[in-house]
């Protein structure tokens, strides 16, 4: 079916290209009247802001609003009837080609009709083939009744409650059909007595019947196979060959149902596994099976509680590098990514390889034991209850979650948006080639695995148990995370919140990252103010004698004696400055640059006279060093610490050579203390202290969330600014306490 989708997509794209180039092209004449008519007609569907947009954007708007879609061109014909009637014939010819493709699809479905038999086997459980055959016997009678009665669900509930069924006299035809298939006594005998004999409590609950009804009613909708009959040897189904609905889908539905129902009947199904095979049969055998009657109900050979069931040991590995969380429609992308990662020696856990039936306990165990979690999100992932439980469970355990986008037109919102946040997203929706995205994902996984804190050994656990002392583990860190001691607050007039501040000579320069920069003393008294237009004052760096370097739109300005002077008026190749830092040792400037057209980032070093010294873009392996730099700090040994919102903390040598990258989700503030340790905040209430070698020394917590700016004051106090508050909180910063850990 994928070839048909491709043909439809090509036809649709070719039609848009023909309409735009042939009828809505301003180059055909100096003043193309068709464009004015098109814009006038477009106001019926889109707002007036599209008057200045391109024609391609207009078509995108119509597609998003559902007015135009591949094969559906009624509205487009109506619009071009008022714009240029010559285009109507072209649109109708394209619609006719779509109709021919649909006809081919129906013919292919008819030729690929398949008849199959589903046979299930239950392992690691006390369920015997006799139990399974009697469950099929119950399902057979429920299915027969569901085909005979429109109110079969209510009828079965009345049977379960032992209430006499009322057959309406107003519909004798349906009542006669119902009686000819099965009467109430036979229905009660086949369901209640069989269910009671199967149940360990000798009384089948209503929940069992509800699940039976649900299985019969939803099997066709969830598997794309119609359930025709059920016999002692399995379930006979009918359907078509479709790549998007593999036989595993039907087997999974049967497995989930059997585990749930037998668990409700009192059996221990925690370790049970169900394998369901799909055997295809020809039409003749299928028709014979539909006519074949059930044999005499077999006697139950129920295993007593005194009999021991032999245990089956599994030798599956319990630890994996990556666990996959996804919605079932994304399984093709998941399998493709999984094969690529395993080829590059990354161990992966996917539920289809390890679980049959109820997968929730197994998924939770896999998340607990895995190092990372790949979250393949889409709109269906967002509305799935199970997917939400998996993602939130990984978050509660503090696992590193790497978002993978599989739906091009979906942006995460709600609970999913909170998890994705500002994390780096890898897109496998078809927008970018797989060969381009997969290596980047592999690099990010390797960085995360490299920076994982060491796991405690058995000797460490024995020592902890013997001393009965346990350090608190918060959010997955194997280090104790404690709160810093708040010693004061400094009120500022910076609104809406603090984006960056720097400290020097007892003064604190506070900026909101938009249009305001204020200088205050340690008491909060305002001394100087720099205010520009909206979006014209991003980040700053302090120079000697109270001078400041400011990023003003696409240029770098220097404020000398309260006057702004151009320092670097423009950057080559259309690069835009993102952040700036100044070395206190030699006065050189380090600037993070971003090119909007090429989607690339660079690090440039300039002397104090404005001369370019070097520009670095890639590391020695040819990989991009940065993706979205936000803030910078420079150590005394001239190493450059860059806060990249997508990669984490990136540290370079003074020459631009890449040293290491420490993965932190959504980092937004960075500073360096007197011992050349790096402090990073990530928009939460956590402060991470990183050693010069790139190891996590200790994570701290502050009292409030959304910490966006940090700076060390006089090596004894830590200043913390927040996104939606003009108040700076001052915490005690103990250098020796960190060294002791």
Image: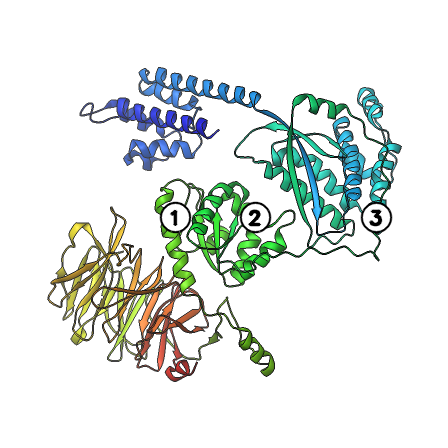
Q: Circle 1 is placed at which residue position?
A: 438
Distance in Å between CA atoms under marks 2 and 1: 21 Å
Look at the image and tell me whether residue 238 can be seen: yes
Q: Circle 2 is placed at which residue position?
A: 353
> Quick check: 273 left or right of 177?
left
Q: What's the colour scheme?
A: rainbow
Dot in front, 1 or 3? 3
Other residues around mark 3 within 10 Å, as few (<14) / some (14–19) / many (≥20): some
> Quick check: 191 left or right of 466?
right
Labels 2 & 1 near each other (Cβ < 8 A): no
Look at the image and tell me whether residue 726 can be seen: no
From the top left corner, tell me how far across and down residue 685 is, in percent. 44, 68
Q: Circle 3 is placed at which residue position?
A: 302
Other residues around mark 2 within 10 Å, as few (<14) / some (14–19) / many (≥20): few
Labels 1 & 3 near each other (Cβ < 8 A): no
Q: Tally the marks.
A: 3
Between discs 2 and 3, the one toward the N terminus:
3
Q: Secondary structure at mark 2?
A: helix
> Quick check: 293 left or right of 523?
right
């Amino acid at each position: 079916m994928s070839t048909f989708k491709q043909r439809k997509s090509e036809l649709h794209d070719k039609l848009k290209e023909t309409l735009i180039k042939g009828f809505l092209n301003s180059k055909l004449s100096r003043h193309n009247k068709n464009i004015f008519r098109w814009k006038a007609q477009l106001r019926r569907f889109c707002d007036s802001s599209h008057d200045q947009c391109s024609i391609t954007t207009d078509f995108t708007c119509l597609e998003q609003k559902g007015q135009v879609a591949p094969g559906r061109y009624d509205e487009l014909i109506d619009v071009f009837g008022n714009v240029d009637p010559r285009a109507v014939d072209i649109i109708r010819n394209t619609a006719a080609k779509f109709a021919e493709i649909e006809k081919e699809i129906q013919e292919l479905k008819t030729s690929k009709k398949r008849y199959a038999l589903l046979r299930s086997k239950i392992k690691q459980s006390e369920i015997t083939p006799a139990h399974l055959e009697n469950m099929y016997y119950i399902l057979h009678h429920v299915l027969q009744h569901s085909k005979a009665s429109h109110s079969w669900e209510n009828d079965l509930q009345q049977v379960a409650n032992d209430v006499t069924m009322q057959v309406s006299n107003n519909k004798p035809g349906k009542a006669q059909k119902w009686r000819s298939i099965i009467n109430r006594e036979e229905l009660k005998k086949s369901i209640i007595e069989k269910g009671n004999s199967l149940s360990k409590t000798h009384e089948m609950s209503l929940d069992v019947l509800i699940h039976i009804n649900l299985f019969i009613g939803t099997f066709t909708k969830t598997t794309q196979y119609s359930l025709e009959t059920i016999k002692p040897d399995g379930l006979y189904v009918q359907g078509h060959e479709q790549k998007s609905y593999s036989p595993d889908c039907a087997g999974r539905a049967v497995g989930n149902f059997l585990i749930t129902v037998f668990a409700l009947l009192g059996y221990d199904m925690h370790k049970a596994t169900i394998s369901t095979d799909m055997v295809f049969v020809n039409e003749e055998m299928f028709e014979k099976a539909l006519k074949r009657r059930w044999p005499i109900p077999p006697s139950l050979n129920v295993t007593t509680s005194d009999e021991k069931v032999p245990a089956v040991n599994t030798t599956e590995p319990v630890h994996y590098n990556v666990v996959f969380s996804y919605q079932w429609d994304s399984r093709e992308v998941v399998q493709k990514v999984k094969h690529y990662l395993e080829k590059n020696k990354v161990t992966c856990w996917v539920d289809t390889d390890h679980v049959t039936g109820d997968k929730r306990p197994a998924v939770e165990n896999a998340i607990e034991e895995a190092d990372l979690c790949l979250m393949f999100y889409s709109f269906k992932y967002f509305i799935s209850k199970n997917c939400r439980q998996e993602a939130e469970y990984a978050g509660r355990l503090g696992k590193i979650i790497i978002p993978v986008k599989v739906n091009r037109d979906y942006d995460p919102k709600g609970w999913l948006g909170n998890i994705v946040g500002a994390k780096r997203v890898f897109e496998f929706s078809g927008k970018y080639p797989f060969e381009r995205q997969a290596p980047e994902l592999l690099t990010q996984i390797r960085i995360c695995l490299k920076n994982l804190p060491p796991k405690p050994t058995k000797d460490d656990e024995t020592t902890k148990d013997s001393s009965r002392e346990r350090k608190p583990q918060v959010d997955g860190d194997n280090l104790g995370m404690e709160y810093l001691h708040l010693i004061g607050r400094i009120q500022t007039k910076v609104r809406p919140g603090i984006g960056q501040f720097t400290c020097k000579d007892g003064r604190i320069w506070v900026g909101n990252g938009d249009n305001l920069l204020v200088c205050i003393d340690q008491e909060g008294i305002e001394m100087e103010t720099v205010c520009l237009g909206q979006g014209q004052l991003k980040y700053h760096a302090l120079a000697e004698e109270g001078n400041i370097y400011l990023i003003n739109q696409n240029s770098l300005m220097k404020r000398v004696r309260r006057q702004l002077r151009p320092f670097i008026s423009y950057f080559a190749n259309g690069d835009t400055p993102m952040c700036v830092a100044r070395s206190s040792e030699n006065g050189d400037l380090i600037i993070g640059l971003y090119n909007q057209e090429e989607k690339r980032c660079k690090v440039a070093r300039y002397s104090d006279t404005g001369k370019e010294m070097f520009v670095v873009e890639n590391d020695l392996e040819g990989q991009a060093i940065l993706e979205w730099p936000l803030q910078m700090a420079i150590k005394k040994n001239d190493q450059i610490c860059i806060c990249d919102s997508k990669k984490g903390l990136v540290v370079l040598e003074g020459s631009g050579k890449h040293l290491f990258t420490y993965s932190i989700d959504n980092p937004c503030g960075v500073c360096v203390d007197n011992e050349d340790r790096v402090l990073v905040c990530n928009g939460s209430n956590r402060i991470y202290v990183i050693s010069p070698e790139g190891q996590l020394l200790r994570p701290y917590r502050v009292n409030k969330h959304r910490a966006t700016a940090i700076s060390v004051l006089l090596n004894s106090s830590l200043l913390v600014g927040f996104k939606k508050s003009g108040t700076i909180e001052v915490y005690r910063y103990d250098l020796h306490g960190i060294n002791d850990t």
